[in-house]
Image (cartoon, grey):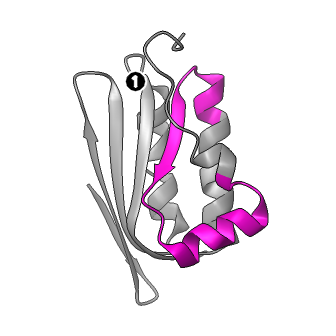
């Protein structure tokens, strides 16, 4: 678990890797230029470990995400793709979902995980 408090903002990222190689990240709080470093800190291990097949980022607890958070997620998505790992955001609140939609990254970041016959 990564917990960070900077400038009065709090971001909590809990991580769990299942036996199927899928890393589950549960994010709680506000993601902005003050807290985005806490989010970025969990991605290297989650995305590049040899036995990781996918990453699910649960945004149910995220109340705000600015452009720095969107950029961090977009970069994580690209890194995952380079390593043959699928990456998916789930449980976005309507206000956060709308921002991702307006920026044009919602479809790519929320695409369903591939089925067993589609994985590389």
- Relative to 28, is 107 above or below? above
- Tell me where residue 38 appears, x and y as whole percent: 44, 62
Residue drawn 42% across the image and 17% down it: 50
Magenta-colored stretch includes residue 90: yes
Residue at 66% in and 24% down: 82
Determine crowd level at label 1: few under 14, some 14-19, many 20+ residues with C-alpha closer than 10 A. Answer: many
Horizontal arrangement in the rendering, residue 103 relative to residue 27 (left or right): right
Q: Is residue 19 magenta?
A: no
The percent coordinates of residue 9 (x first, y second) are: 42, 84
Q: Would residue 67 be seen by someone viewing this image from the given angle?
A: yes
Number of numbered discs visible in the structure rendering: 1
Q: Which residue is mark 1?
A: 52
Residue 34 visible? The answer is no
The magenta region covers 79-106
Residue sitting at x 24%, y 30%:
18
Which residue sits furthest bottom?
Answer: 8
């Amino acid at each position: 678990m990564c917990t960070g408090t900077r400038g009065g903002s709090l971001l909590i990222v809990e991580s769990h890797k299942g036996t199927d190689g899928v890393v589950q990240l549960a994010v709680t709080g506000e993601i902005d230029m003050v807290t985005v470093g806490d989010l970025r800190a969990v991605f290297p291990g989650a995305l590049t470990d040899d036995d990781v097949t996918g990453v699910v980022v649960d945004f149910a607890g995220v109340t705000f995400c600015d452009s720095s958070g969107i950029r961090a997620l977009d970069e994580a998505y690209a890194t995952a793709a380079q390593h043959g790992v699928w990456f998916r955001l789930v449980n976005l609140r309507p206000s956060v979902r709308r921002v991702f939609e307006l920026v044009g990254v919602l479809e790519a970041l929320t695409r369903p995980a591939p089925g067993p016959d589609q994985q590389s």
